[in-house]
């Protein structure tokens, strides 16, 4: 067998275990994994290093307008470069439908934006306007192209679908084998809190955290799960930030819901006290759901360890600390008019490795599962997320001992701050590969604009998840009525 590249002498870590071995690569694929491989036009020495699947970042807002029209600071070039420096070989940002827009047009728009990417990419659709045409014609066309996941919102007046709209989307998704992602916060609870705070003149950034109560997330997660169970549709709860929310998810996974969830580094690393920094500094830490408290952080780690969460993703939503981003509505505006989101696509995996593996909260195998392998299964990335013959050669080689201090300038994004600034982390992705091509090596970008490719995805893998049949859908209990 001939190889273009052989990675030799490293410790190969998969979601199942680790072993010393070599990887042979040809035509962008892994073609051999063995104790020792000779040959290779290029030989990469991975002695003393961990050789893992490249990360798959599945929660990132790239070249995306918010519902109020603010464009993210990163496009597919800068966003993908930043992802690559953070140990990712591919990503799945969102393609967002604004109300009144056709889904076909949305996909066309993002296809043009995606062409700049240096790593492979796919999209989750965001659906804000589920018209009959969207449900019966456009979503099936998107599925046929391999766009097999989409996100819906339970909050924000311009995005929120209402429970009926969610049931429509969940049912269509179920029919096609797609998975629905949900941003779960109770819209009315948040609006009511906003009114309460405004009436008292409480508008500093820190009140953002108070305006979006933990109970609003817990209520909405519970409701989203019951809606999904009613139609037996798979559901992925994004950016879980509360103990109560995580517990509902754990309980309902046990009860047979086809239920997946993630949390994000910011909910593990930061707290609402970060919103109470001097002047308007707290604006940098405005994201939704909001940052919580220290007690919640350790509980979320426990859920990571125990498998409640299939992934830890960045929710990279980059808005600069200036008039193009955070202060697009003015420098001296209430928290509710400050752009909502923070960057973190480059910091996600170094943070998870350092605080997770190095501090003994998770194993290296769990790190791999949480950074790529689990997500590859849930989102149908059939050729990614594993080190095995036949898979794409999407590989990250890590120095598990090198220490770094996080600095905004090293994130390689278009941002002017990092919420993780100054954190001391151990473990650095030294070489990152996408389909056999080195894209980052020793802090240098080796990739060129546009070399990333769009990848279509398979339906969610639901093997081992028996059907859940609500009594009202069971002909034995509903007077023999066939509803599905
Ligand atoms: N939800 C996200 O997932 N990202 C940014 C803002 C938001 O509400
Ligand atoms: Zn969200
Ligand atoms: Zn997000």
Image (spheres, rainbow, N blue to C red):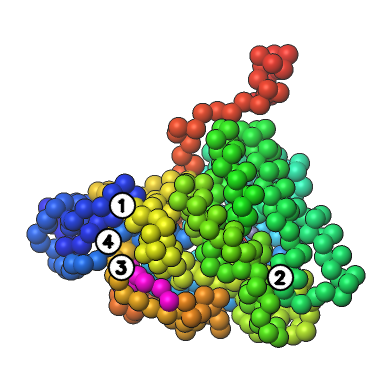
Circle 1 sits in a helix, a strand or a loop, which is it? loop
Residue 364, x across and y down, in percent: 34, 56
Q: Earlier in the sequence, mark 3 or mark 4?
A: 4
Circle 2 residue? 69
> What separation in Å lies between label 4 and label 1 (alpha carbons)?
9 Å
> What separation in Å lies between label 4 and label 2 (alpha carbons)?
41 Å
Task: Identify the residue at image location x=69%, y=49%.
Answer: 218
Circle 1 residue? 14
Q: Earlier in the sequence, mark 2 or mark 1?
A: 1
Circle 2 sits in a helix, a strand or a loop, which is it? loop
Relative vertical location of residue 156 with respect to residue 419 in this rendering, above or below: above
The stretch of residues the image draws in magenta is: 424-432
- Report the residue that reaches farthest toward the right: 199
Q: Nearer the viewer, mark 3 or mark 4?
A: 3
| Viewer-closest of 366 and 459 | 366
Circle 3 residue? 400
The answer to whether the residue labelled 4 contacts the one labelled 1, judged by CB atoms less than 8 Å apart, is no
Q: Quadrant of residue 260?
A: top right
Q: Nearer the viewer, mark 2 or mark 1?
A: 1
Q: Earlier in the sequence, mark 4 or mark 1?
A: 1
In the picture, measured across the screen, residue 451 lies left or right of residue 172, that is: left
Residue 53, x across and y down, in percent: 33, 57
| Residue 149 part of the magenta segment | no
Q: Earlier in the sequence, mark 4 or mark 2?
A: 4
> What separation in Å lies between label 3 and label 4 (alpha carbons)?
10 Å
Relative vertical location of residue 261 with respect to residue 396 in this rendering, above or below: above
Residue 4 visible to the viewer:
no
The answer to whether the residue labelled 4 contacts the one labelled 2, judged by CB atoms less than 8 Å apart, is no
């Amino acid at each position: 067998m001939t190889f273009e590249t052989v990675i030799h002498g490293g410790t190969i870590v998969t979601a199942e275990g680790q072993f010393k071995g070599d990887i042979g690569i040809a035509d962008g694929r892994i073609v051999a994994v063995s104790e020792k491989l000779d040959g290779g036009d290029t030989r990469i020495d991975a002695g003393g290093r961990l050789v893992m699947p490249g990360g798959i970042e599945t929660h990132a807002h790239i070249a995306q307008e918010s519902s109020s029209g603010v464009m993210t600071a990163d496009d597919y070039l800068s966003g993908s470069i930043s992802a690559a420096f953070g140990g990712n070989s591919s990503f799945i940002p969102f393609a967002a439908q604004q109300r009144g827009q056709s889904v076909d047009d949305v996909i066309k728009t993002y296809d043009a934006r995606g062409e700049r990417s240096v790593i492979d990419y796919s999209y989750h659709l965001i659906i804000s306007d589920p018209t009959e045409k969207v449900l019966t014609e456009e979503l099936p066309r998107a599925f046929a192209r391999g766009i097999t996941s989409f996100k819906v919102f339970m909050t924000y007046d311009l995005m929120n679908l209402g429970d009926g709209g969610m049931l429509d989307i969940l049912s269509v998704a179920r029919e096609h084998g797609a998975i629905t992602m949900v941003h779960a916060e109770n819209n009315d609870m948040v609006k009511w809190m906003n009114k309460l705070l405004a009436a008292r003149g409480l508008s500093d950034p820190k009140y953002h955290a108070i305006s979006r109560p933990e109970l609003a997330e817990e209520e909405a997660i519970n409701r989203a799960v019951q809606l999904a169970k009613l139609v037996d549709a798979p559901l992925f709860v994004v950016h879980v930030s509360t103990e109560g929310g995580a517990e509902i998810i754990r309980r309902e996974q046990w009860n047979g819901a086809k239920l997946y969830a993630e949390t994000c580094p910011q909910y593990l690393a930061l707290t609402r006290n970060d919103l109470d920094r001097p002047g308007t500094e707290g604006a940098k830490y405005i994201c939704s759901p909001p940052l919580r408290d220290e007690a919640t952080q350790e509980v979320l780690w426990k859920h990571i360890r125990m498998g409640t969460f299939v992934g830890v993703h960045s929710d990279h939503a980059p808005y600069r600390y200036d008039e193009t981003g955070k202060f697009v509505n003015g420098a001296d505006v209430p928290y509710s008019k400050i752009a909502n989101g923070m960057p973190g696509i480059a910091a996600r995996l170094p943070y998870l490795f350092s605080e997770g593996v190095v501090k003994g909260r998770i194993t290296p195998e769990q790190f791999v599962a949480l950074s790529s392998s689990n997500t590859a299964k849930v989102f149908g990335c059939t050729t990614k997320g594993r080190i095995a013959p036949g898979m794409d050669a999407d590989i990250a080689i890590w120095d598990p001992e090198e220490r770094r201090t996080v600095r905004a300038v090293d994130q390689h994004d278009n941002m002017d701050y990092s919420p993780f600034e100054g954190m001391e982390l151990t473990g650095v992705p030294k070489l990152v590969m996408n389909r056999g091509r080195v894209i980052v090596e020793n802090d240098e970008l080796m990739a060129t604009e546009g070399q990333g490719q769009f990848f279509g995805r398979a339906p969610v893998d639901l093997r081992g998840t028996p059907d859940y049949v609500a009594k009202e859908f069971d002909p034995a209990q509903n007077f023999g009525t066939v509803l599905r």
